[in-house]
Image: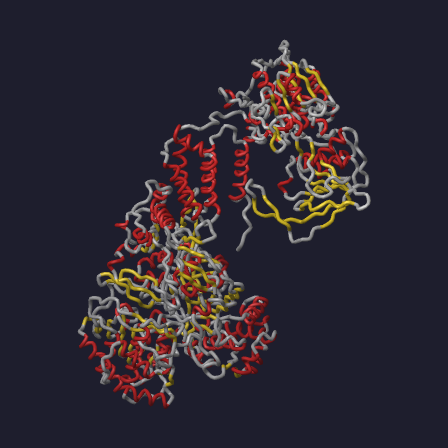
Amino acid sequence: MRQLPKKGNMNERIDTVLHKFRSRMTSYPPGMCPLTLYRSLLHISMNQSCGKCIPCRDGLHEVDRLLKSIINGEAAPDTLSELEKKCLMIEETSDCAVGASGARLILDSLKDFSDEYESHIKNKRCIENTVQTIPCITLCPAHVDVPGYIAHIKEGHPEDAVKVIRDRNPFPTACAYICEHPCENKCRRSLIDAPINIRGLKKYAVDNVSADSVPTPRRNVSTGKKVAIIGGGPGGLTAAYFLALMGHKADIYEEHEKLGGMLRYGIPEYRLPKEMLDRDIKAILSSGDIEVFTDTKIGRDIPFSKLNSEYDAVYIGIGAQLGNRMPMENHDAEGVIPAADFLQKVARGESTDLSGKKVVIIGGGNVAMDAARTVVRLHAETVHVFTRKRDDYTALESELESAMQEGVRFRTLLSFLHIETNNETGTVQAVWLQPEIVNTYDDFGFVTTEHSSNYPYRFKCDLLILGVGQRSDSEAFSKEGVPVERGRILASEACRVDGMEGVFSGGDCVTGPSTAIRAIAAGQVAAINIDEYLGYHHKIALETDIPPAYPNPCIPTGRAEIEEKDPFERRTNFDFVELPMTYEEAMRESGRCLRCDHYGCGSMEGGRGDK
Amino acid sequence: MITVTINEKICSGAEGSTILEIARANGIYIPTLCFLEGVSDIGSCRMCMVECEGYQMLLAACRTKIKEGMIIRTESEKLSSYRKAMLELILSNHKTECMSCPSNGACELQTLCNRYEVSHGLPYGTRTEMDLKLPILHDHPFISYEPQKCIHCQRCINACHQIACNGTLKSDRLGSFHIVNAPFGKAYKESGCESCGNCVSVCPTGALTLKKENAYRNWEIKRVLSTCPHCATGCQLYLIVKDGKIVNVEAASGPSNQKRLCVKGRSGSIDFVHSKDRLTKPLIKAPSTGAFREVSWKEAISYVAERFMSIKKQFGSEALAGFACSRSANEDIYMVQKMVRTCFGTNNTDNCARVCHSASVTGLARTLGSGAMTNPIGDITTDVDCILLVGSNPEEAHPVVGMQIRKAVKKGTRLIVVDPRDIGLSSLADIHLKLRPGTNVAFANGMMHVMIKEDLIDHDYINEHVEGFSELKALVEKYTPERVAEICHIDPHQLVEAARMYATAGKAPIIYCLGVTEHSTGTEGVMSMSNMAVITGKIGRSGCGVNPLRGQNNVQGACDMGAMPTDYPGYQKVDNEDVRKKFEHAWGVSLNPVPGLKATDVFPAAIEGRIKGLYICGEDPVVSDPDTHHIVKALESLDFLVVQDLFMTKTAEYADVILPGISYAEKEGTFTNTERRVQRIRKAVTLDGDMRPDTDIIIDLMNAMGYKQPYLTPKEIMDEIASVTPSFHGISHERLDRGESLQWPCPDKDHPGTPIMHAGHPARGKALLYPAEFKESQELPDEEYPFILSTGRILYHYNAAAMTKRTPGLMDISGEGFIEVNYKDAERLGIGKGDRITVRSRRGEITATAHVGRKVSEGETWMPFHFPDSPVNILTNAALDEFARIPEYKVCAIQLVPNKHKEVKV
């Protein structure tokens, strides 16, 4: 007699373990020895061995024995070659992928972490990462004291929470609304249930106290030094904020009419209402001696060399605002526009009604999603997003989901062949799409595609938005001697521009298009290093104390998500889409925080991860 | 054909062959350890890995199929070092106490380690510690498993699943380690293990061993190729001989067994040979005391000859009879019938085929012209579409055939089981017709009714090769599925489906056994099987035919050799003038033209006083024939009884003279298996004692009785057989010793034998369709005796158990007589599982342990006939079939008496 699997059979029961396994893996804290991690992976391979073949079932155990001796600092130098030989043997002789991939893992580690291996054998210690650090603080590029401000929220002090955030990041409001929250990725709370909704709590704080009503720290007496900040986006404003608090004079040169950079001209109103952004900017501008020159483009209105000679230091934070176009015929035809340009146009209020228009968007990143959802709100008849591969949907999962809810249509495995324009008007009237099939992975680990045998087809389109990346407007700087490679300014992790005294740079113009919080981190680092460059070590006061930590009962509790409004309502206007967190939600959510600043590694010297 | 390059040599092979196959075919050595042809190609040991251009990984030659243009290297520095590494890894986790290991010298791991100069494993074995804690399993009487020596090649598991097709050895897991779940611990009886030991025979190390293997090392023994002495499958085996004693049995690759053996063959074939209770001296019973005394051969021979001759003188030739033994060699049997015909001067000779397959011999000879299995075992269990298995439980009675049927079913062959019991195979059957015992003829008529009505028959075959179709058609017309269902107690839809399934299958053999023959309508049952095959044209073709599975090792031979009252060797009729003249010429005496008495008629004749003297070679009718009281009465009525045997059997106790013969392991000769395949037995040992080769005893007797019989070796006797038997003309010991495998008819020295009979046309010329009406069995249940009793065999014993009961392990596994009772009947009568109950028929009563369950239907019971504590033939009915005089073992009426009732009575 045949039987269906028994209910509650071992495989099902194991699935619950695997769930725990996954959450363990996601909550692997920063500060691990990579070899111990590899050994865990090796153990997974050993567990997965069915026990049939000798190389896998017995050989992997031998590899484990060698790896363990290396990790424990007991191995001789020739253990490495023994390990490599064994792994090669296992990889080449395994019957299936379990053994071969297990051995391949270790072979990869020998290549990718040869320094770590060497350190274990020679020095009997790890090369770096010797101290584990608090996940949220470490992973926030600006190293905001997350447990600290959550504790304030829990205590009912949102203004103190704002102060704690500002200690590292002067955009508590903007980040509460749009931050990608890498701080949540490895939250230790995953060990119990799910990561804390850190952005949600931050938003609760700034929803309950207007950031511009919270005083910035007392500023230093004036130093008499002057720093030019090129670009009034999140990075430049952050640098200006901290420099001003340190007593320096910061002059901000902004190309646009208003400050905020991409936060204003890239992020649509429904995600970040401009009045909320203005609260942060208002607070920043009130922090010290900051002068703003809007509608002033360096390289057009003022030469860069002039600033460089007139100021004690310069920070270049010009971002990456120029939308890319594809190198193909008709790419600049009427009705074809890069997503960043389109969003800027709308943000400037030049929006047009798209009623009755078929809109096509190429690309699956966050900017493309912003464009798509904006198009929906401009009453377009249809909005289609086409990508070549599923991997091309790099936007946040929540952004994709919201776009789908709002009626954006998605198609994948279509490559973009060419743009068809109307012979008479020259405006776009269709795009041609080539069906693709997936192929092997490339050297970077991305899947490639090739043309399918299915025929290309024509897709009617009145507006074509290209969400295929942005670049910096760096040409003018390059001309004046700033080192630029492939459009990006060359600067170190300390934000010093290579070979230029007193010139600092950071954010998108150095890294390529990225997130606001990374630009903010760069602004912060640059400000501290400019201060140091100018010969100081100014401190910035945190004018609040972190509430004490209490033991957490660790009762598994759901994560309070931020909900959005009815999608059909959302798509009719540019109103902010998220619903606020209630008091009860915020209290429960902040109560889940495990206070890693107090418990565990956070109490150790160097264990906070904020350096 | 696909061409590849191996070590720069261009080799070609058929599509689908593996690198290993093509390399071996071209004489290129690739080491293997876990691989075993036909058993396992899981590629676990990686010893056979080779380099192949275009592949980064190495390929396991045993399981990689060749592709056009492959460029392969089988040897390189890297390969050698990897192979060494594998052996080191294995050795790290292997107990290397080779000195005390029974596989020392036969161990494949040892051989490879020597070849690759690997003397020890790594200092640290990853699973050694765990293995040491796993218990050694040695509760099974024959087999033990030592985990510390297991290299986890899984050959044993594959052998159990793919060769024995039983599947009781399984893979288990302990943490991240594979372990072998071997059923040889305390619960071995409940495991479903058939104890066949095929797993042991494939183990490359000493992890799985037969306990007998501890007695010797590989270099101390010689192997003697022989044939299994149990059932008629004719498995080839090696007798392992050390210092003049047979110490073990190994499977050989015979055509019918393909290296398989069953528990009887592997573990029950030698203990009886060396049994302490073997008869070693001729014995004569003192008429006054009834006690036997040891006598010299001279005295015994002259006494026997004198007594038989005086009976002949006083009462005539017809007062004498002599039975040959279907367990003994063809050469012995030929001499017995020759003695009876030339010295006794009568055709009163027979063998125990009378009580098992005489109905097949008679029935099939009548319908097809030859009374033997039509197709070889391999042919009807490989690549066939459907097997119609009627009244046969091969898993127990012909286990190696059973294994091959299981394999066929596993590979997709449909199986129709027609049997009154839930036999093991019925759980694998597409359809199980659990019919009432004794209703085979009705079943077959019902099948044919459907086939004819739905026009599923082979008109061309019928038109060309068949006679009697219209008579058959008229008769089966009445056997509607509904009527047959009522007679047989089956579902009419299942009958219709079975008919469609069998008739429409391209290749479909009928395989049947004693469930068809052992009835008072046995011959008609056999002819009904033939009828079904004939009207569907399933005769004379591969994968088809009518295939009786013969019982004893040489029951086919016993019939072939003319131990039959109607036939000289090779089914040449005694009442045929030309034939008789030929034999008179060959044997130099005038021969009796009157057909003799059949064995089952000899006993009533003895009671009536018509038979006065009887010579029995190796049979034990007191145990094996129906209605024991009737047999005993017949033996007691004789003036003179001679028994030639290995043991003091129940029958021997009634003898006047007992002559000690020798067993299959002590003599040269041949057995003919159920497929008509003549196979050699060879002398492996000479034992202490005065027992003598049976042919020598018979020749002595013949000479003493006045017939000038020259002393011939078994080889010379076979030459004489060949000279007088057309179907054996081409058969000789020389040809067999050269490795030829011959199935009769083999009409000349260059003939390769005949695997499939009736090819082209039936041997008879045209096949006869015999219309048989269904007749009820002779003794049906009634109010007084309300249950039907059938008898049969179980896996662990053979017939009267003279051989198998002398193997203690077999008795450990199964040593007690039992009766299968339906649970509803048991509940009604208050019989519990394991109760010892009284079983009574009109002829006597015995006790047996009740096995209560669903195996038999309500109102039916079943008993094995092996066990001395439940001698079931005291109960059975000696009702005989009209044609073959075969007794109705399969149906008699009994009553069941729970013991507590009896106690109350007492």
Q: Quadrant of the C terminus of chain B?
A: bottom left
Q: In this view, does B64 lie to the left or right of B595?
A: right
On screen, B628 above or below B105?
A: below
Question: In which quarter of the view is residue B347 placed?
Answer: bottom left
Provide residue B180's location: percent of width, then percent of height.
40, 49
Q: How many marks?
A: 0
Taking depth in this image into account, of B431 and B248 the one nearest to the observer is B248
* Residue at the image point whose x is 22% and y is 85% from the top: B706
Taking depth in this image into account, of B106 and B820 the one nearest to the observer is B106
Provide residue B877's location: percent of width, then percent of height.
41, 72
* Residue at the image point whose x is 63% and y is 13% from the top: A225
On screen, B531 above or below A456?
A: below
Instruction: Please say whether residue A153 is visible from this viewpoint.
Output: no
On screen, A261 above or below B164?
A: above
Instruction: Please say whether residue A142 is visible from this viewpoint.
Output: yes
On screen, B744 above or below B584?
A: above
* Residue at the image point whose x is 50% and y is 58% from the top: B824
Provide residue A40's location: percent of width, then percent of height.
47, 36
Question: In which quarter of the view is residue B18 placed?
Answer: bottom left
Provide residue A519's location: percent of width, then percent of height.
63, 26
Question: In which quarter of the view is residue A426 placed?
Answer: top right
Taking depth in this image into account, of B84 and B471 the one nearest to the observer is B84
* Residue at the image point whose x is 67% and y is 49% from the top: A435
